Amino acid sequence: MKNYLIKTPTIFKAIYNRCIWHVTEHANSVYITFDDGPHPEITPWVLAQLKQFNAKATFFCIGKNVVEYPEIYQQILAEGHSVGNHTHNHYNGWKVSNAMYFKNIKTANEVINSNMFRPPYGRITLAQANGIKRMLPKSQIIMWDVLSGDFDTELAPTDCLDNVISTTKPGSIIVFHDSEKAFERLEFALPKFLKYCQQNGWNMKKLNF
């Protein structure tokens, strides 16, 4: 399946320079994020791991999942984490019209109270990025500079852990997924990565824009 990059190239950051790829003023912190939830079993498991290591994180939620599992969404907030909009139906910006894409984001925005947006698959056109900024003037498009690869069913859990350990540095925004597809790799890698961050003296903080 390997058709993705673990470390985001500088050229991508330059082209999509209106997006946030990492945190410059990081105070020796890293920023762990989770896409595609909330999930009724996996998200609470993730929250338990974060609590064990006194870590905060950011959850980019799919609107329809928030509607289906509102109590899990509220648990994320109650435990001090931040949330972001990940569209209502996990739309790929390269495969739908701009009008459909913007409408889906606005629908999710009705149930997700956040100025942060992350495009599913990281796929968004420059026109869509500019349109989101016009539609939601306070919005920030959050990308990443470290991709764990936990969604890759052909990736060994040990390689998933190596992906994040070998590329994360202070200021990094790291992507995991609180989804069934990713759980085999997430279950192995996340606790060990949290411990690694703790051992390095890195603060594990939520994004807040």
Image (cartoon, helix red, strand yellow):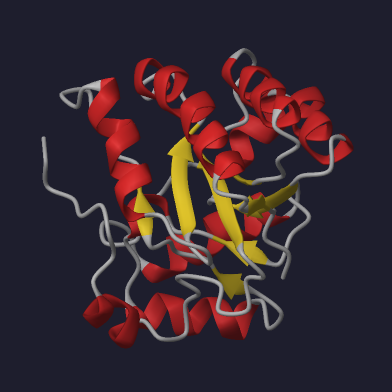
In the picture, the quarter occupied by the C terminus is bottom right
**Where is residue 92 drawn, in percent x and y?**
34, 53
Asked if residue 144 can be seen in this view, the reply is yes
Q: Quadrant of residue 124?
A: bottom left
Relative depth, front residue between 103 and 42 = 42
Q: Is residue 142 above or below residue 4?
A: below
**Which residue lies at the image location 57% right of the left edge and 18% below the top edge?**
42
**Where is residue 181 drawn, in percent x and y?**
36, 21
> Would residue 56 appear left or right of 85 to someone viewing this image?
right
Relative depth, front residue between 69 and 53 = 53
**Which residue lies at the image location 45% right of the left edge and 39% below the top edge?**
176
**Where is residue 153 drawn, in percent x and y?**
22, 23
**Which residue lies at the image location 43% right of the left edge and 61% below the top edge?**
144
Q: Is residue 154 above or below residue 104?
A: above
> Would residue 129 appear left or right of 78 to someone viewing this image?
left
Q: Residue furthest right?
A: 78
Asked if residue 62 can be seen in this view, the reply is no
In the picture, the quarter occupied by the N terminus is top left
Q: Is residue 179 above or below residue 125?
A: above
**Which residue lies at the image location 28% right of the left edge and 65% below the top edge?**
8
Q: Is residue 198 above or below residue 14?
A: above
Number of labels in the image equals: 0
